Image (cartoon, grey):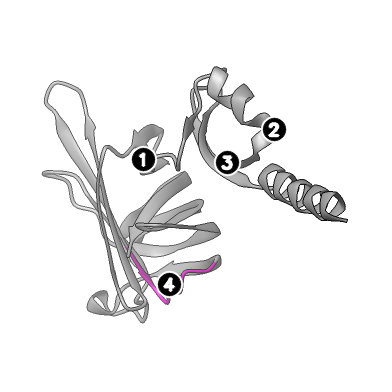
Amino acid sequence: MFLFLLTIIFTGCQKGKLDQKYTICHTDPKTGLQETLEIDISSAQYHYDHGDVEGECPHINSLSYDWVGTPINAEQFTIERSGKLLSIRAVDILYGATQTPVTLTLKIDGYNSKPGTFYFGTPESWGGNSTTYAMFQVPAWFYPPSREGVFEIKEVKKKKDGEVINGSFSITLGGQGFQDWPLTDGKFSLLIPK
């Protein structure tokens, strides 16, 4: 009887160990992109042998779009959240005869840590009625705020230091008396701090 109970306890402990999940940072060998995965103990050694490490991957913010035929990939970010207002400021440096900073500021009103769609419009300060809007700045050039557009959060991933939002956007700047300046093919992956 004692031996039977001991066998049950030992088997239960072993099963619990095998069912245990581990969080690792997996690096794709082809692309070099990193992804946080939960794996079983049975596959842990395989991942470690291929250079994956234990724990979550550090998040690196990314935001890109096309501006009148010029691809923009932001290099610097300021991201703040106040209640349901999410403010994103993304800066890229265009290299030419002179280094030119291009700044895109997005104000998203109604953000609630869930996937959703937000529509840009002319901000109230410009006589519109939208509190979700975009501003585009290039030194010595002037652009009006967003006339229309969409910012779609497709995925929200919870992390220890905040949450990561992934999605896409497109914006048309301009309005009455202005030429349209479209920002297209927008994509983002951003860490929203707690």
Label 3 crowd (10 A; few <14 / some 14-19 / many >=20): some
Q: Give the residue at the far front of this rendering.
A: 2
Q: Is residue 112 magenta?
A: yes
Q: Main secondary structure of the magenta part?
A: loop
Give the CA separation, mark 3 to mark 1: 16 Å
Kind of residue at disc 2: Ser
Determine whether the residue tagged by mark 2 lies in a helix, strand or loop. Answer: helix
Report the amino acid beneath label 3: Leu
Q: What stretch is highlighted in magenta?
A: 107-114
Residue 41 percent across, percent down from the top left? 65, 37
According to the image, label 3 marks what residue? 37
User: Is 3 included in the stretch rendered in magenta?
Assistant: no
- Residue 104 is marked as none
- C-alpha gap between disc 1 and disc 4: 21 Å
Compared across the picture, whether 36 is left or right of 131 comes to right
Q: Please report contact status of discs 4 and 3: CB closer than 8 Å, yes or no.
A: no
Q: Do the residues labelled 4 and 2 touch (CB within 8 Å)?
A: no
Q: Is residue 140 above or below residue 154?
A: above
Gap in Å between the C-alphas at discs 2 and 3?
Answer: 14 Å
What mark, if any, has residue 60 been given in the picture? 1
Alpha-carbon span between mark 4 and mark 3? 26 Å
Disc 2: which residue: 42
Residue 134 placement: quadrant:
bottom left
